[in-house]
Amino acid sequence: MNSSRQRQTGCKSDRPRHYCGLFGVYGADRAAELAHLGLYALQHRGQESAGISAADGQRILTHKGMGLASTVFADPAIVARLRGHTAIAHNRYSTTGSSSIMNAQPLAIEFKCGQLAAAHNGNIVNADALRGAMEADGSIFQTSSDSEIVLHLIARAAYGPLPDMIAEALALVRGAYCLLFLAKDQLVAVRDPMGFRPLCLGSLKGAPVVASESCALDIVGAEHVRGVEPGEMLILDSHGTASRRLPESPRRAMCIFEYIYIARPDSRIFGQMADKIRRQFGRRLAEEHPARADIVIGVPDSANTAALGYSEASYIRFEIGLIRSHYVGRTFIAPEQSERDLKVHLKFNPVTGVVKNRRVVVVEDSIVRGTTLKQLVRMIRGAGAAEVHVRVGSPPIRFPCFYGVDMSTCKELIASSHTVEQIRDHIGADSLGYLSVEGMLKTVPFPKDMCTACFTGEYPTEVPVAFEKEQFDAARKCR
Ligand code: SF4
């Protein structure tokens, strides 16, 4: 789920940002309460807004708002009001400037077949073309989100069973999507034919549950059944769980960044535990870029797993050398000048007793801009480290992502315009080593089925058309 306006803001973080977590359950008591729990487990996938739609067989009720699930659903009465045995839920990622309740999901509409609510994770690459054509045809959009385009396409599809109308609509859509649709007596879950984003199926005492990551199944006590296949549509209703297929794609393109950073380590993603793959990235990184050092530390929390892998393979002791505060509010406005410095300090602090007089390997999972890492290196040196060696558990990010991860402009990716040595100099490290593309691909079980476009520039689809052209030109210049 994305909007062009958001895209133009570019990436503001040192780590990739990503969009949206999905959760759905059919045929369970107090479905909205389960969905509410699911939102907590998937909070890392989006913190801008949260919402739940619930259906009781007669009607759909939706509640959504800006902020974390704990904020949006702070009053227990809200969830209690969302009665019904079926629910879908959505966490959305935040970007500065364009956060808006109008883009919060699930999107709820009334159309010729009645009420429908939808939740989307991903990014539709031909959104501008589809929207332009529909607007020229008189359509009026309520949001700047590409997700709404799918609802318009469904509303225009030939009248029939909802899964048929969804399939007809999705035949026109290109790009990355996992979608949940809630009708008053049916839940439909779809994963795009290339399988960019993950979606899994679980069972809670026989009630089917779908979620972006398996950690959301765990939190409700559901058993993991399997991943939803690329191009698979699951239809959950009173007849049980049915599966059908969208037209086959010639290739798959599962986002390798889910393994590097996005997914929680305790989630099963694309058939593998994220923890296992991420640890192997760290091990391989140690083989490719050894360091003479006394300790290995990770940039918390997401790089800790790769740091453990680095430590295991290098026999250099793993330590907790950076502490991350989880309580920094997203709306905090830091005073002027060193706003960014202060933000980094608010978030991270080195453990002096751990790093002082030590040669430290700092493992990070990825570098987008390099700004935070530069300050972390300075901070660790300030705490007395003798040497700081940075190791990155992914290759240099040199190209924008068009599939739902907020790395939208080439110019904001430091590796698109700097060599590794220049980046080392920029962040002030004694040495810098990235995992190679080859090493990364050797670590995952189905390398040919992964998307690696942000590292290689080899896009698995046509890139989008308007901003797309500008950005792709920029990407080409980066080569
Ligand atoms: Fe994932 Fe990178 Fe592909 Fe985007 S371009 S889907 S972040 S691997």
Image: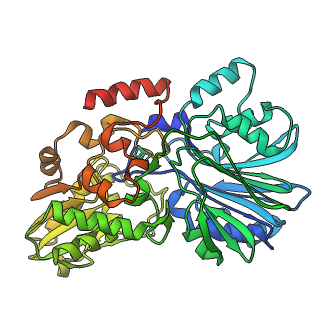
Closest to the observer, 279 or 466: 279
In the rendered view, tell whether residue 231 sits above or below residue 276. above
Closest to the observer, 2 or 472: 472
Question: Which residue is painted at 28% across and 74% down in the image?
Answer: 308
Tell me which corner region of the image, top left, top right, bottom left or bottom right, holds residue 81.
bottom right
Picture coordinates of residue 361 (x, y %)? 17, 68
Closest to the observer, 54 or 281: 281
In the rendered view, tell whether residue 94 sits above or below residue 278. above
Picture coordinates of residue 390 (x, y %)? 18, 60
Closest to the observer, 334 or 278: 278
Q: Is residue 284 left or right of residue 339?
A: left
Picture coordinates of residue 46 (x, y %)? 53, 56
Q: Is residue 208 left or right of residue 41?
A: right
Q: Quadrant of the N terminus?
A: top right
Q: Residue furthest right?
A: 58
Q: Quadrant of the C terminus?
A: top left
The image shows a total of numbered marks equal to: 0
Q: Residue furthest top?
A: 136
Q: Is residue 327 left or right of residue 136?
A: left
In the rendered view, tell whether residue 434 sits above or below residue 457. below
In the rendered view, tell whether residue 377 sits above or below residue 183. below
Question: Which residue is painted at 69% across and 22% down in the image?
Answer: 135
**Res. 74 visible in picture:** no
Picture coordinates of residue 229 (x, y %)? 59, 54
